Amino acid sequence: MFRFLFKIPAHRTFEHTPIYYNPAKEDLKRRVQGVEEEGQSHASKIARGSLKESWGRSARISKSNRSSSIRLVSIIFILALVSWLLLFN
């Protein structure tokens, strides 16, 4: 009786063609891309002659990490000593 007042949506159809998925091929493609990108990055470092610089930078970073680790351990030791003195004295 009141159908002309309400709009009913039409049935929707989708045309989907399934795509064949081959996991072995996808994995091989991903690994080949990774090796190619890795080879390009190493070649660019050697070509620019920055290999020596990168080694020196890593040595400086490790020295700073070592000093910060020593500082952290000493702070923890001092805090533990102070807390032990406060709790047991």
Image (cartoon, helix red, strand yellow):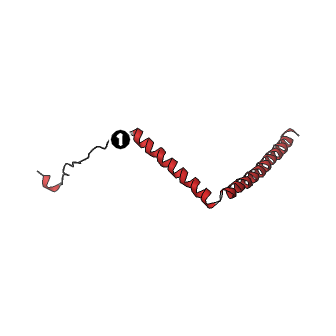
Three-letter residue code for mark 1 = Tyr
Residue that extends furthest to the right in the rendered view of this protein = 89
Q: Is residue 56 above or below residue 86?
A: below
Element at badge 1?
A: loop
In the picture provided, is 47 more to the left or to the right than 2? right
Task: Identify the residue shown where x is 37% and y is 39%.
Answer: 22
Task: Identify the residue shown where x is 50% and y is 48%.
Answer: 34
Q: In this view, does 89 lie above or below 46?
A: above
Toward which corner of the image does residue 48 lie, by quadrant?
Answer: bottom right
* Quarter containing the C terminus: top right
- Look at the image and tell me whether residue 87 can be seen: yes
Residue that extends furthest to the bottom in the rendered view of this protein = 48
Residue 41 percent coordinates (x, y): 56, 54
In the picture provided, is 77 more to the left or to the right than 13? right
Task: Identify the residue shown where x is 32% and y is 41%.
Answer: 20
Q: Name the residue under label 1.
A: 21
- Look at the image and tell me whether residue 2 can be seen: no
Residue 28 percent coordinates (x, y): 44, 42
Residue that extends furthest to the front in the rendered view of this protein = 47
Residue that extends furthest to the left in the rendered view of this protein = 1
Decide which of 24, 1 is in the foreground and name it.
24
In the picture provided, is 18 more to the left or to the right than 31? left
Residue 18 percent coordinates (x, y): 28, 43
In the picture provided, is 80 more to the left or to the right than 15? right
Decide which of 34, 82 is in the foreground and name it.
34
